[in-house]
Amino acid sequence: MHDSLQKMIGLAGIFLGVGLAFWLFFGAPNGWSGDMRYVRFALGLGAYALIHAGVVLCLPEMLKSGEPEGSRGREGKSRTA
């Protein structure tokens, strides 16, 4: 897959996930009672998964470094005591 196409698909996933999350928070009907609250929870998890997958598609080089994210300094270099 071309890099530009991958980044566009990733951005679309981010926008869809954020849109779904905003709809659940601001615009969803308030009748989520009983077992429907589990559906709302599942939709919220799906929105989070869409946002995460979009970020992974947009920034694949950030995840291939081999180091944990917290061990890098501000410049992206490894910290040395």
Image (spheres, rainbow, N blue to C red):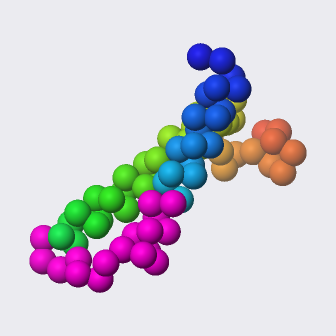
Q: Is residue 31 magenta?
A: yes
Q: Residue at x 42, y 75 (%)?
A: 27
Q: State which quadrant residue 3 falls in.
A: top right
Quarter of the picture holding the N terminus: top right
Asked if residue 76 lies left or right of residue 16, the reply is right
Q: Is residue 63 magenta?
A: no
Q: Residue at x 36, y 57 (%)?
A: 45
The residue range painted magenta reads: 19-35
Q: Nearer the viewer, residue 1 or 28?
A: 28
Q: Nearer the viewer, residue 55 or 66?
A: 55
Q: Residue at x 81, y 42 (%)?
A: 76
Q: State which quadrant residue 68 falls in.
A: top right
Q: Position of residue 28 (x, y in %)?
A: 36, 74
Asked if residue 41 lies left or right of residue 76, the reply is left
Q: Is residue 35 above or below residue 8?
A: below
- Visible residue check, residue 67: no
Q: Position of residue 42 (x, y in %)?
A: 28, 59
Q: Position of residue 57 (x, y in %)?
A: 59, 34
Asked if residue 43 lies left or right of residue 2, the reply is left
